[in-house]
Amino acid sequence: MPKIKTNRAVAKRFKKTAKGGLKSAHAFTSHRFHGKTKKQRRHLRGTHVISASNTKKYLKLLK
């Protein structure tokens, strides 16, 4: 059996957490900030943890 290749698109976008979850950057942060409030922009900074239902799907692609 050949080895399963890692999906490179997923590997570039997600990082594993210590407990086995996934974290990624927020969407809607590349342009058009004049239409967003300061509060929205502040909350879009940093990373967030992916939901459990999606984590399962993406972890399969990371193997």
Image (cartoon, grey):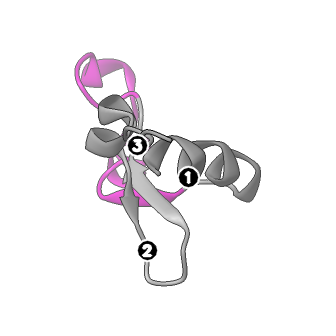
Structural distance between the alpha carbons of marks 1 and 2: 12 Å
Vertical position of residue 29 compared to residue 56: above or below: above
Vertical position of residue 60 compared to residue 52: above or below: above
Q: Residue furthest front?
A: 1
Structural distance between the alpha carbons of marks 1 and 3: 18 Å
Task: Give the residue at mark 1.
Answer: 59
Q: Quadrant of residue 29?
A: top left
Closest to the observer, 21 or 6: 6
* Label 1–label 3 contact, CB within 8 A: no
Task: Give the residue at mark 3.
Answer: 26
Q: Residue 10: image x %, image y %?
A: 39, 37
Neighbourhood count class around disc 2 (C-alpha, 10 Å): few under 14, some 14–19, many 20 upward: few
Amino acid found under the numbered disc labelled 1: Leu
Residue at disc 3, secondary structure: loop
- Part of the protein shown in magenta: 28-49
Task: Determine if the magenta segment contains residue 34.
Answer: yes
Residue at image point 44% right, 59% down: 23
Q: Residue 41: image x %, image y %?
A: 34, 43
Q: Residue furthest bottom?
A: 18
Neighbourhood count class around disc 3 (C-alpha, 10 Å): few under 14, some 14–19, many 20 upward: some
Task: Give the residue at mark 2.
Answer: 17
